[in-house]
Image (spheres, rainbow, N blue to C red):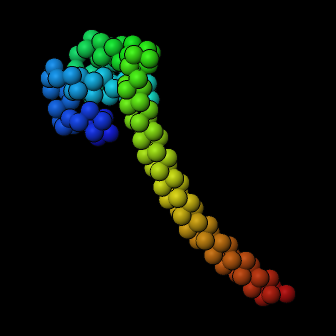
Amino acid sequence: MNEVADIYNVERDRIFLGSREKNIIFAKRLYIYILRKMFKLTLTEIASVTNLHHASVIHHFERFKFFHEHPKNFKQDAINLQRVEDKIIEVEVEEEIHALEKKRLSIKKSLTKLYKIKKLKDEREKIKNLLTK
């Protein structure tokens, strides 16, 4: 949402306040389009997140879709969408890398612990075998 607000030079909190300013409407449309296309939210979920009626969500989604499908006339919309998509992908990749690194460290700790336990078990077994001979 911050990226969308930056693109259209609007305050993030003003995007869904019902303003009719052109840049705010375009920001709202792009944000709704991203929620639907990239995050696969339902219209009801988007309505809940944006505090809009589902009919308004449909309207804004369809308007952005129309503009996006006619890039010759609305080239800037396509550029803005690409910028937001790139940012989302970049953030998601970084978050996934971070999560996997945490898992890797956790697995390494667990393996170290299990190897120590196995070593103790093997040593005890060895001592037991020596005592029984």
User: Furthest-right residue in view?
Assistant: 133
Nearer-the-camera pick, 68 or 95: 68
Position of the N terminus by quadrant? top left
Nearer-the-camera pick, 80 or 65: 80
* Residue 55 coordinates in the image, percent (x, y): 27, 11
User: Furthest-front residue in view?
Assistant: 72
Quarter occupied by residue 64? top left
* Residue 70 coordinates in the image, percent (x, y): 43, 14
Nearer-the-camera pick, 60 or 95: 60
At 50% from the left and 46% from the top, the residue drawn is 93
Q: Is residue 1 visible?
A: no
At 46% from the left and 45% from the top, the residue drawn is 90
Quarter occupied by residue 118? bottom right
Position of the C terminus by quadrant? bottom right
**96 left or right, relative to 2:** right
* Residue 7 coordinates in the image, percent (x, y): 30, 35
Q: Can residue 59 be seen in this view?
A: yes
Count of numbered badges drawn on the protein: 0
**133 left or right, relative to 117:** right
**89 left or right, relative to 4:** right
**112 left or right, relative to 87:** right
* Residue 83 coordinates in the image, percent (x, y): 41, 36
Q: In this view, does 41 lie above or below 101?
A: above
At 19% from the left and 37% from the top, the residue drawn is 11
Q: In this view, does 102 lie above or below 25?
A: below
At 17% from the left and 23% from the top, the residue drawn is 21
